[in-house]
Image (spheres, rainbow, N blue to C red):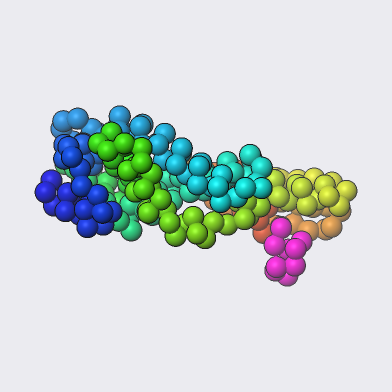
């Protein structure tokens, strides 16, 4: 655990008073001993609070729904896993033998949980100000390059609003094909705007994702971004 302590000090400029908290934050439930699940629960709440405060200050005129979308884009598992990779958390995780063999140190959910657990451990060890300082350092670039909330709205909603603003009928989504084995199914759908004689297709691992893809392509066509 000394290696992990040095990593945290070098990478995040933080030294634990209680080094045991860091060890627990990096211990997955597949390993023996106390896991990081409780710390992940706490860190999730601390992270939500700090990021909520940050986007509230950065976007003083944004409405509640836009603030929620901005926060969600920053704290979703995909974003947290990216941060874990950037920080090198994976190599310090304590995993059970089975999870280690299956590449658990690269698994998105495990990495995201570990990031939150570290934040929770810092909060317990040194309080909310220390946790806030660490979180803001880790998220500094992402907060500086915060996207427009409009860009975070899902494509189906944006397409619906685009059509309604022009008093056009809503798009029709149709499931055209499901193929592959049960655990690896692919869904194909079409999105049709009849009044404009436009149709696009989407394919993904779920019907919802396929519809979003088709809606995204339809928006690109209607806005002139693609022929």
In the depicted view, which residue is nearer to us: 128 or 77? 128
Q: Position of residue 127 (x, y in %)?
A: 31, 36
Q: Is residue 221 left or right of residue 31?
A: right
Q: Which residues are magenta?
A: 219-227
- Against 127, residue 160 (above or below) is below
Seen as rendered, the residue at the extreme bottom is 227
In the rendered image, residue 65 lying in the magenta stretch gets the answer: no
**Residue at 77% of width from left, 47% of height from top?**
161
Image x and y of residue 28, in percent: 24, 38
User: Residue 101 location in percent, x, y?
Assistant: 20, 47
The C terminus lies in quadrant: bottom right
Residue 31, compared with residue 79, is above or below; it is above
> Is residue 178 or residue 205 the one in the foreground?
205
Q: Nearer the viewer, residue 94 or 44?
A: 44
On screen, residue 143 versus residue 62, left or right, reads left
The outermost residue toward the left is 2
- Point 44% across, 42% down: residue: 50
Can the viewer see residue 45 in this picture?
Answer: yes
The location of residue 136, given as percent across then percent down, is 41, 50
Direction from residue 206 to residue 162 in the image, left or right: right
Camera-side residue: 70 or 107? 70
């Amino acid at each position: 655990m000394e290696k992990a302590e040095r990593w945290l000090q070098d990478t995040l400029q933080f030294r634990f008073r209680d080094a045991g908290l860091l060890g627990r934050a990096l211990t997955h439930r597949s390993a023996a001993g106390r896991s990081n699940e409780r710390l992940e629960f706490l860190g999730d709440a601390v992270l939500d609070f700090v990021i909520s405060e940050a986007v509230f200050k950065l976007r003083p005129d944004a409405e509640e729904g836009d603030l929620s979308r901005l926060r969600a884009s920053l704290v979703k598992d995909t974003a947290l896993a990216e941060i874990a990779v950037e920080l090198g958390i994976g190599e310090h995780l304590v995993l059970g033998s089975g999870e280690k063999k299956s590449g658990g140190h690269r698994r998105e959910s495990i990495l995201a949980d570990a990031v939150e657990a570290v934040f929770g451990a810092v909060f317990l060890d040194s309080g909310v100000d220390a946790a806030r300082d660490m979180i803001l350092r880790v998220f500094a670039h992402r907060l500086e390059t915060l996207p427009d909330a409009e860009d975070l709205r899902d494509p189906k909603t944006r397409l619906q609003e685009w059509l309604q603003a022009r008093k056009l009928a809503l798009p029709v989504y149709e499931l055209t094909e499901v193929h592959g084995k049960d655990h690896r199914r692919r869904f194909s759908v079409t999105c049709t705007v009849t009044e404009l004689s436009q149709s696009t297709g989407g394919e993904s691992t779920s019907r919802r994702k396929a519809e979003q893809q088709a809606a995204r392509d339809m928006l690109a066509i209607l806005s002139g971004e693609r022929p």
